[in-house]
């Protein structure tokens, strides 16, 4: 039998190290086994995105829940969780909800053997693997159905195939619980009839955060008084005088105010004189041209017109869980604030483009370059305009309506609101919740199953590629040859 001889020093210390490692791993496994036996519910989430742990905001909300709800998973647990690692993650999230509140129960329904369960909810179309959140007891009430596919976010590959990229299990179940227990959801109306953008994904995002959304053509008359938020996204046709009167009536709300209008501009819009006058009354103007960025660290995918915007205040940015996440405001018109305060109207920036930004005029020649820009940053990307009714006794505003103006309709586009690398979803929901007077809606971002992307300058990318593709392998190969030659001639 051949005997392997190790060099003296390595033989002594190497053997000892291997034995120590084996003993250490054995002791660690034994300790883990005893802990699990002693505390069956003990678990640790070591994932970067905390895939198996509820956010602090969610735990705080469900900890104060006053109504009892049941989370029905329409499958046996082993069937649901065993279907994929993604389902297993979602299943653990369900359990965390049940652990987080004594008023939340988790029930698995063998939907294959008990199809009669659906007869208790005749208005719903359910299938195996869906999740139903309903009030506890036999009293009925509002229910919320979460489809299996709604527990995740997807991306389409180059071949057109779909793949799961992030989990929204916490967001989906939290929103369902909120919908079941909330007395009054926020109502939002998308204005139509002027060739506006629809922004379906943004509407879906609002729905996920317990907003009831409808489309409304002002030719039908006044906006439903129960509406809290009106959205006008890049209309291509001007509003009539009567339509603007209806918007004023909505914001005044019979003297009670408390309403919000969200207007998004876009460089593709023609001149809209009546809308421009309306916005100027509130203290803001959407100027000509399109914003570009010269700092490649402040753009998306090296596209100069896909610029990042900075937070200009702390009231809303302070609510972000990760305040270092950027806001994407692609293909934007520059905004200009006309006054800070006048006749109970006020205007302030919420987002600003940086000092490295500029504006390309709509009539710019083909030879236009960044150095030709007459308008340079910083200037606003998102402006909050308010009208306040001042209480004469206290001297404070007790009734307020708001007009929120964005220079970019793309701030609501799929690229911006569905990408966990950007704060668009969380920030905009924070703003709209606060303006709508809702404090119980917590914006939850998707939890990515994949690693984080790096937005690096092209020169840095090239250098890193050179290092890892050529220099590092060459260095390893050279070191190996040197060691081999030394050992051969030793």
Image (cartoon, grey):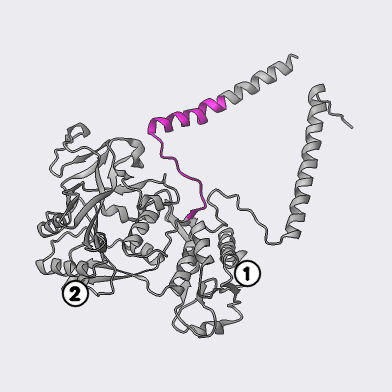
Q: Please give the residue where the numbered disc 1 appears in the rendered image.
A: 77
- Given residues 440 and 33, the one toward you in this image is 440
> Residue 100, relative to residue 475: is it above or below?
below
Name of the residue lying farthest toward the top: 489
Q: Say if mark 1 contacts mark 2, CB within 8 Å.
A: no
Task: Say if the magenta span includes residue 55.
Answer: no
Question: In the rendered view of the protein, which quadrant contains the N terminus?
Answer: top right
Residue 301 seen from this side: yes
Please report the residue visible at 41 percent of the width from the left and 64 percent of the height from the top: 441
Please report the residue visible at 19 percent of the width from the left and 40 percent of the height from the top: 360
Span highlighted in magenta in the image:
447-474
Q: Could you tell me which secondary element the residue under label 1 belongs to?
A: helix
- Given residues 358 and 436, the one toward you in this image is 436
Task: Say if the magenta span includes residue 455.
Answer: yes
Please report the residue visible at 39 percent of the width from the left and 30 percent of the height from the top: 459
Please report the residue visible at 52 percent of the width from the left and 31 percent of the height from the top: 468
Question: In the rendered view of the protein, which quadrant contains the C terminus?
Answer: top right
Residue 222 disc label: 2
Residue 231, given in percent of the width and then of the height, sits at 26, 63
Q: Main secondary structure of the magenta part?
A: helix
Residue 115, given in percent of the width and then of the height, sits at 56, 82
Label 1 or label 2, whichever lies nearer to me, is 2
Q: Residues within 10 Å of mark 1 (few under 14, many from 20)?
A: some
Q: Could you tell me which secondary element the residue under label 2 belongs to?
A: loop
Residue 169 seen from this side: no
Name of the residue lying farthest toward the front: 393
Q: CA distance from mark 1 to mark 2?
A: 50 Å
Q: Residues within 10 Å of mark 2 (few under 14, many from 20)?
A: some
């Amino acid at each position: 039998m051949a005997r392997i001889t190790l060099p003296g020093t390595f033989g002594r210390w190497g053997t000892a190290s291997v034995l120590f490692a084996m003993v250490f791993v054995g002791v660690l496994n034994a300790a883990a086994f005893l802990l699990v036996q002693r505390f069956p519910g003990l678990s640790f989430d070591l994932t970067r995105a905390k895939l198996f742990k509820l956010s602090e905001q969610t735990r705080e909300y469900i900890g104060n829940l006053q109504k009892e709800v049941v989370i029905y998973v329409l499958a046996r647990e082993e069937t649901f969780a065993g279907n994929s690692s993604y389902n297993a993650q979602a299943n653990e999230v369900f359990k965390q909800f049940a652990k987080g509140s004594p008023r939340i129960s988790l029930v698995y329904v063998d939907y294959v053997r008990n199809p009669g369960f659906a007869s208790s909810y005749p208005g719903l179309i359910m299938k195996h693997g869906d999740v139903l959140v309903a009030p506890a007891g036999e009293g009925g009430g509002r229910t919320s159905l979460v489809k299996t596919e709604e527990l995740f976010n997807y991306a389409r590959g180059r071949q057109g195939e779909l793949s799961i990229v992030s989990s929204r299990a916490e967001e989906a179940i939290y929103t369902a619980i909120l919908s079941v227990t909330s007395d009054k959801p926020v109502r939002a109306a998308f204005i139509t009839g002027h060739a506006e953008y629809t922004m379906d994904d943004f509407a879906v995002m609002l729905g996920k955060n317990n907003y009831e959304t409808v489309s409304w053509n002002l030719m039908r008359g006044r906006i439903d008084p129960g509406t809290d938020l009106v959205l006008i996204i890049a209309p291509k046709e001007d509003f009539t005088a009567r339509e603007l009167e209806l918007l004023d009536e909505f914001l005044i709300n019979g003297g009670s105010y408390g309403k919000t209008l969200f207007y998004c501009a876009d460089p593709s819009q023609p001149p809209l004189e009546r809308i421009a006058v309306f916005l100027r009354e509130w203290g803001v103007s959407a100027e000509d041209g399109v914003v570009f960025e010269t700092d490649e660290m402040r753009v998306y995918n090296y596209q100069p017109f896909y610029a990042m915007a900075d937070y200009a205040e702390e009231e809303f940015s302070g609510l972000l869980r990760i305040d270092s996440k950027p806001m994407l405001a692609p293909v934007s018109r520059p905004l200009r604030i006309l006054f800070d305060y006048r006749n109970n109207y006020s205007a302030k920036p919420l987002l600003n483009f940086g000092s490295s930004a500029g504006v390309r005029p709509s009539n710019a020649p083909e030879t236009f370059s960044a150095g030709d820009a007459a308008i340079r940053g910083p200037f606003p990307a998102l402006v909050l305009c308010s009208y306040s009714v001042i209480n004469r006794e206290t001297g404070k505003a007790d009734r307020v309506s708001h007009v929120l103006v964005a220079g970019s309709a793309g701030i609501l586009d799929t690229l911006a609101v569905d990408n966990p690398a950007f704060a668009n979803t969380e920030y905009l929901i924070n703003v709209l919740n606060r303006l709508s007077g809702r404090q119980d809606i917590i914006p939850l971002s998707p939890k990515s199953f994949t690693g984080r992307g790096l937005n690096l300058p092209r020169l840095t990318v090239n250098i890193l590629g050179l290092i890892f593709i050529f220099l590092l392998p060459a260095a390893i190969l050279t070191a190996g040859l040197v060691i081999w030659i030394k050992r051969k001639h030793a």
